[in-house]
Image (cartoon, rainbow, N blue to C red):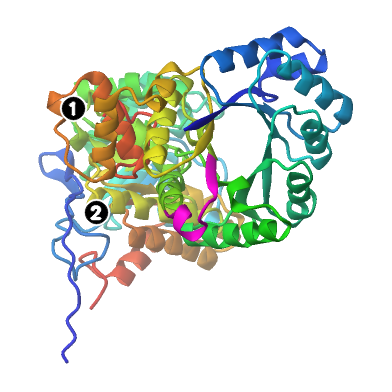
């Protein structure tokens, strides 16, 4: 008897989210199949995308094998971003680390001006992350949104403590929100419900928090997997958003990555590959060699090489 | 539905303070209120009670029996406190609770025989909480068989499948559905046994103002599947109204959700919609979040 592989069809669709404008546009999401289920009925119009992260200040901890590819550019965020563009990224992620009260506590308008300059100088769409300090982000991110009105940036993290003020600024100035919750599917859904009371769900991307290999990656993996399953299989509107895995910094915080280059690249690479397999739509890395490594591994069009 | 009034509970600050200070008024007020509200048992949850065990239990049991004729449920994991409590009960009490754990089998179950009382037996074992419905059934069959050998008949056994919070990351909803199934099949596997649950645990961790609707909806669902009794809050008037057979329209809506029927929300009142949404969460038809009523 001939074997016939079962083919599933699903009810849900991950919303397609567009970031950037004009000739620098990036689309993520849009799939109506589970991650890599190319054998099922449906499609993945936008293969997962990759961004490299730059900081708005020179890193205080100098890990030589992490910073070497960028040379002197690390002292200037714009040059750093331009350098990243030479490595074949889909987007640039600018982290406004200096605004963190625990770092330089630099003022919101200074950060917003930098974002504005970067938008005009780079050729790729821009992702902007605040420092993660929910109080300071409530000042910094609305100002970024305002000064860059109409640029359709991907801005976050929007957290449960500041979603109203940050979310409204994102809505009013035409950007996309990164909704971030602490590795918990119920809290993740709750934040999306609250955010989507005023923000169209097509303008929300989920950041479930990405833990590094050896530091809780299992939680991130199964959470991303579940978000996709609940969205695609049960058609839960509040989990049908694309997922961003901001993993670079998490990996380079580990002592294993800091120890030596090979270990660091593999640490970031395996973390990225795992979260890609779980279903992340946009992955943020730090090292250009990791980017190269993972692109080679998954093949040029984001699909596993056949 | 037999309601075991849960409000005399040492986790409540005023209760633990009242016990410590031997303040009869506080305890007796709670006992009276619950009696008037229509409870069938009064639960005395005293925790581990390591100090002055005998004397405290005697005081507490007598203090409650002065103001109510209801039977008592002695709720502790400490066998010494349990025996001290059972000893002073005038009406046939409920031993709350034993389990499949070795200690419990050796120390609690014999007390049920000795005092000829009803006994709650949970599905817990030495390995912890059995994860699936099947393993819960297996575990409870073992423990009930053990109890039978001690001379405790099925009719005196109230099986507790252990309710867990529906809000716990993902798994909670699966367990809520599993426990509904458990209650449904229990009479087939252990004919004659009764059943009970610690109802309020289903809403543990949920914002306080949202807890009652989860408790009520789940109790209606469990009752439909044959639940015999619940440790619950008899002061929740709407919960008691459901248990008296009132609020029939809402009950029917909850049943429809259980049966997987489509429900047109546009024709319903806000209150009815809230119950439908809550039932959908408890049936795991929609992912739980604290904002489940707002979607």
Q: Quadrant of residue B276?
A: top left
Whether A255 is among the magenta residues is no
**Nearer to me, A48 or B136:** B136
Residue A174's label in the rendered image is 1
Q: Which residues are magenta?
A: B185-196
Asked which secondary structure carries label 2, the reply is loop
From the viewer's perspective, tell me whether residue B152 is left or right of residue A31. Answer: right
Q: Is residue A95 visible?
A: no
Asked which secondary structure carries label 1, the reply is loop
> Residue A79 placed where, x, y %?
34, 43
> Residue B63 placed where, x, y %?
76, 16
Query: Residue furthest toward the top?
Result: B25
Q: Could you tell me which chain the residue with mark 2 belongs to?
A: A
Q: Quadrant of residue A222?
A: bottom left
Q: Disc 2 vs disc 1: which is toward the camera? A: 2
| Residue visible at 50% across and 23% down in the picture | A105
A7 over A271 or under it: above or below = below
**What residue is pinned by disc 2?**
A233
From the viewer's perspective, tell me whether residue A258 is left or right of residue A171. Answer: right
């Amino acid at each position: 008897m001939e074997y016939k592989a079962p083919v599933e069809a699903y009810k849900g669709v991950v919303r397609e989210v567009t970031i950037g404008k004009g000739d620098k546009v990036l689309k993520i999401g849009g799939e109506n199949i589970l991650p890599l289920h190319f054998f099922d009925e449906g499609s993945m119009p936008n293969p997962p995308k990759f961004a490299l992260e730059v900081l708005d200040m020179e890193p205080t901890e100098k890990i030589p094998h992490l910073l070497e590819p960028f040379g002197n550019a690390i002292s200037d965020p714009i040059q750093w971003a331009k350098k990243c563009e030479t490595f074949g990224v889909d987007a640039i992620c600018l982290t406004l680390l200096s605004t963190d009260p625990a770092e330089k506590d630099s003022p919101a308008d200074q950060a917003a001006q930098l974002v504005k300059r970067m938008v005009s100088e780079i050729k790729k769409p821009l992702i902007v992350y605040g420092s993660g300090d929910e109080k300071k982000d409530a000042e910094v991110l609305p100002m970024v949104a305002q000064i860059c009105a109409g640029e359709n940036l991907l801005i976050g993290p929007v957290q449960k403590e500041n979603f109203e003020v940050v979310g409204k600024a994102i809505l009013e100035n035409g950007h996309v929100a990164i909704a971030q919750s602490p590795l918990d599917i119920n809290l993740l859904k709750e934040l999306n419900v609250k955010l989507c009371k005023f923000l169209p769900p097509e303008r929300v991307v989920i950041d479930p928090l990405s833990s590094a290999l050896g530091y809780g990656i299992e939680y991130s993996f199964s959470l991303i997997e579940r978000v996709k399953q609940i969205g695609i299989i049960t058609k839960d509107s509040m989990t049908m958003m694309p997922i961003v895995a901001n993993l670079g910094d998490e990996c380079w915080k580990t002592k294993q990555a800091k120890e030596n280059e090979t270990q660091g690249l593999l640490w970031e690479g395996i973390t990225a590959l795992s979260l890609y397999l779980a279903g992340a739509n946009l992955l943020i890395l730090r090292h250009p060699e990791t980017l190269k490594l993972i692109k080679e591994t998954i093949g040029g069009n984001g699909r596993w090489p056949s | 539905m037999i309601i075991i009034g849960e409000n005399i509970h040492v986790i409540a600050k005023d209760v633990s303070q009242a016990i410590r200070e031997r303040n009869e008024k506080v305890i007796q007020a709670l006992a009276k209120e619950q009696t008037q509200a229509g409870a069938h048992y009064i639960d005395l949850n005293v925790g581990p009670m390591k100090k002055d065990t005998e004397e405290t239990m005697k005081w507490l049991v007598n203090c409650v029996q002065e103001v109510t004729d209801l039977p008592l449920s002695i709720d502790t994991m400490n066998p010494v406190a349990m025996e001290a409590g059972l000893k002073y009960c005038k009406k046939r009490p409920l031993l709350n609770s034993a389990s499949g754990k070795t200690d419990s089998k050796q120390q609690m179950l014999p007390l049920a025989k000795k005092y000829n009382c009803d006994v709650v037996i949970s599905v817990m074992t030495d390995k912890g909480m059995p994860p699936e419905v099947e393993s819960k059934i297996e575990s409870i069959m073992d423990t009930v068989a053990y109890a039978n050998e001690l001379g405790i008949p099925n009719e005196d056994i109230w099986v507790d499948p252990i309710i867990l919070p529906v809000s716990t990351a993902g798994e909670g909803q699966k367990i809520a559905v599993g426990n509904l199934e458990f209650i449904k099949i229990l009479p087939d596997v252990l004919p004659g046994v009764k059943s009970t649950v610690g109802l309020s645990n289903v809403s543990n961790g949920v914002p306080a103002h949202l807890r009652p609707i989860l408790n009520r909806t789940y109790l209606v669902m469990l009752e439909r599947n044959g639940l015999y009794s619940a440790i619950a809050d008899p002061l929740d008037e709407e919960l008691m109204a459901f248990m008296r057979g009132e609020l029939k329209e809402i009950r029917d809506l909850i049943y429809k959700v259980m049966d997987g029927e489509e429900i047109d929300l546009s024709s319903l009142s806000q209150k009815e919609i809230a119950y439908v949404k809550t039932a959908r969460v408890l049936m795991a038809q929609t992912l739980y979040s604290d904002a489940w009523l707002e979607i």
